[in-house]
Image (tube, rainbow, N blue to C red):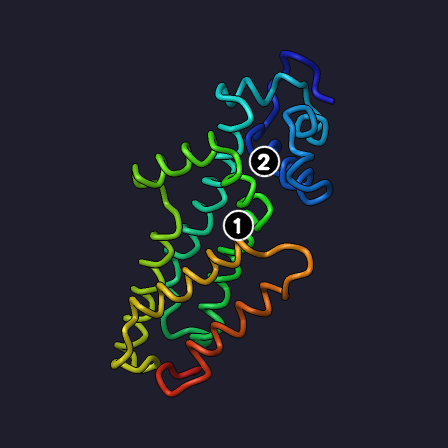
Amino acid sequence: MSPRGVAVPDARERLFAAAERVVAQGGPGALTSRAVTEEAGCSKGLLHAHFAGGLDEFVAELVLDRLARTAALADRLPSRTGQDTVTANLTDVATALFTSTGPTVSGLALTRPGVAIRFREAMASGAPGFTTVQEAVTAYLRAEQRLGRVDGRIDAEAVALALVGTVHHLLMTSHAGTPDPHAQIRRLVTALAGGGPHIADQ
């Protein structure tokens, strides 16, 4: 364990990764400041030193950080225009969006009022999130339309909304005993991108 007063490199990421492990192992009820710092192998005051708002601020920042990573990945999607297949490119982004925080952590954020408020405020202030990903998918589909790999008659924005909206739904409703969400994402992308005449799986 890191001694008190000693700087911990990449402390935020270390705490975030520890929180994800705690929730994966014990469920939402296991997530406490003590559990996170013990899992991270650091002093108990480290979390509060970096997140003055306590556990609510910590969880909100965790979710925002993971969403921002996925948004950055989505921003690079248009650069993949003409590469691989449309289905593969969309699946990569949709899967990354689902696994960016996982349904358990995302659900935890919504069940803690303080976290939900911080999250909504961040989204309203322009923090990268689901809308950012949707816009990137729309731009990608339009770029593929210009190359002829996606039928120019489809509504790219509507397809992007359907994809991102479904992933958001899965994040909020997936739990033990429900169908594999990754399989559902693959089915959805196949239906949108490869299962019909609108989008060529080239």
Q: Answer left or right for 76 relative to 19.
A: left
- Image spot of residue 17 (x, y percent): 62, 38
Q: Which circle marks residue 16 in the picture?
A: 2
| Numbered tag placed on residue 100 in the rendering | 1
**Secondary structure found at label 2:** helix
Q: Nearer the viewer, residue 66 or 113?
A: 113
Which kind of residue does numbered mark 1 sit on? Ser
The residue sitting at 57% across, 35% down in the picture is 13
192 versus 104 height, above or below? below
Would you call the spot at circle 2 few (<14 residues within 10 Å), some (14-19), or many (20 or more)? many
Residue 76 vs residue 184, the one in the foreground: 184
Residue at the spot 33% in from the left edge and 79% down from the top edge: 150
Q: Position of residue 126 (x, y in %)?
A: 30, 41
The quadrant the N terminus occupies is: top right
- The amino acid sitting under disc 2 is Phe
Mark 1 nearby-residue class (10 Å; few <14, some 14–19, many ≥20): many
Of the image marks 2 and 1, the number of the one nearer the N terminus: 2
Q: Position of residue 43 (x, y in %)?
A: 68, 19
- The secondary element bearing badge 1 is classed as loop
> In the rendered image, which quarter contains the C terminus?
bottom left
Residue 48 location, quadrant:
top right
Q: Residue furthest bottom?
A: 197
